[in-house]
Every structure is written in structure tokens, then in C-alpha cells.
Image: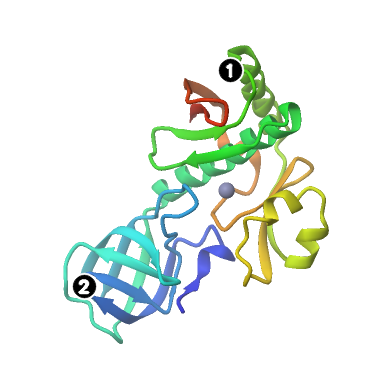
Amino acid sequence: MSKALYLENMFLKEFEAEVVSIKDGKYVVLDQTVFYPKSGGIANDEGTITRGSDVFQVVYVGKFGGQISHEVDKVGLEVGDKVIGRLDWDRRYHLMRYHTAAHVLSGAFYKNLGAKITGNDIASLEQGRIDFNLENFDRTLIEEQVARSNEIIQEDHPVETYNLERSEVEQDPDLVKLAMGIPKGIKEVRIVDIKNFDRQPDGGCHIQSLKEIGTISIKKLVNKGKNNRRLYFTIE
Ligand SMILES: [Zn+2]
């Protein structure tokens, strides 16, 4: 099983690793990696894997059978190769800002309106998307939550990640509603904690303090029914 270094250090940009398996020449598993695989509605990292002077572009990263698989742009890597991985940091940092912004928005919608998030998509560097359930599709109400989210960002709460025992999560009134979706076999749950604002079980990458987000703006609102009020947003 490859070790997911990004879970412990989300600001690690470069790492040494060994190739442990290759499928069809281009799908590479390393003993450890900082590359985040596409999952949870968040886009994958990109970057390079280098062996000596050979540079392989990482064009996609996915999780297959519990393994993080890096798709590279050409064949040539071999099992046992010692390599250096480097993230496209601008891309990752952008995705982290969008991801944390989505948590702030979902916190605001839940706290102020009782609206629950039904989906999210942080797939491009140009915009993010969250879906939520809301009885009335009320533009003013939605605008208010975005304004409230920007106030929270200005308060610059720190963002922390840590693991909790599953039993602790199940006994916590704030977390229990989210714990139900966690697969049975998982004993430790990683929590992303925007201090004094919002906590969620989460396996993704986040910035360290809210001001790094900047300002959230509504790009577009789409009404896909009661359970899918859709908000496209940008940050700058
Ligand atoms: Zn998340």
C-alpha cells in the first residue's frame, strides 16, 4: 500500500520514492506519494516523476483497489526505480484554497439555514461548485451565506487536521451525522477542523488559515430541484 504523504503534510511539494508496480507501462504505483488522487469531488494533482535526467509528466492520479496510481505521459519507468516526485504546486495550492472555501460555504449554509451539502466539484482552477438542499431557491438567502462566508474568512480561523477514533466521531453530535457515510472498516477518521467554525471528516488537502482563500464570489446559481441548489463560485 502506498503511503499518502499528503495526509500528514499538505505543504510537501517534493518527495523521494520507489516504483513498486506498473500497469500497461504508464500507470505507476510508488511506495509513497504526495500526489492527491481524484476523489471526494476534488481534482487530482499533477506534476512530474523524475528518474535521473528522465522526466515523466504526471497527467492523472486516481485510486484503484486502495492504491494511488499515477498516470505518466510515456513508458520507461521500471519497478525498483528510485524517483523524485514534484507537484505542480500552483495547481495544488489553488485546489486547496477552493476546497477549504467549499468547507466554509457548507459550514455557513448548514449553520444558518440547516442546508446540507449534497455534492461538490472542485475540478477546475477556474471555479468550484457546491450543491445543497434548500426548501426555497432564494437568491438573497444564498447571497447572504456567501457574504457570511467572506466574514468568516476575514476572521482568519486556523485550519487543522487530525485523526479521531471512530467511536469518538460517533459520540460527537456535530460529527455523527457525517460519520454514517464512513465505510465500516475504518477505525480512525481524519477530521478537517476550521477552528471554532466547522469540522468534517475529510481526506483531502487544505490551506492552513482561512485568509489564504481570498474572497468568494458567486459565479452562477442553478436550480436543479430541492436537493440540488447549485452554486458555482470563484475565489480571488
Ligand atoms: Zn472536503
The numbered mark, 1 or 2, whose residue comes first in the sequence reads 2
Q: Is residue 236 left or right of residue 185?
A: left
The colour scheme is: rainbow
Measured as percent of width and height from the top left, residue 134 is found at: 63, 26
Q: CA distance from mark 1 to mark 2?
A: 56 Å
Q: Nearer the viewer, residue 46 or 132?
A: 132
Residue at 58% in and 32% down: 132
Residue at 32% in and 76% down: 83
Measured as percent of width and height from the top left, residue 170 is found at: 77, 60
Residue with the mark numbered 2:
53
Q: Could you say which quadrant of the image residue 145 lies in?
A: top right
Residue at 82% in and 55% down: 172
Q: Nearer the viewer, residue 47 or 115?
A: 115
**Residue 192 seen:** no
Residue with the mark numbered 1:
137
Q: Could you say which quadrant of the image residue 8 lies in?
A: bottom right
Q: Which mark is residue 178?
A: none
Q: Which element is circle 2 on? A: loop
Measured as percent of width and height from the top left, residue 54 is found at: 20, 71
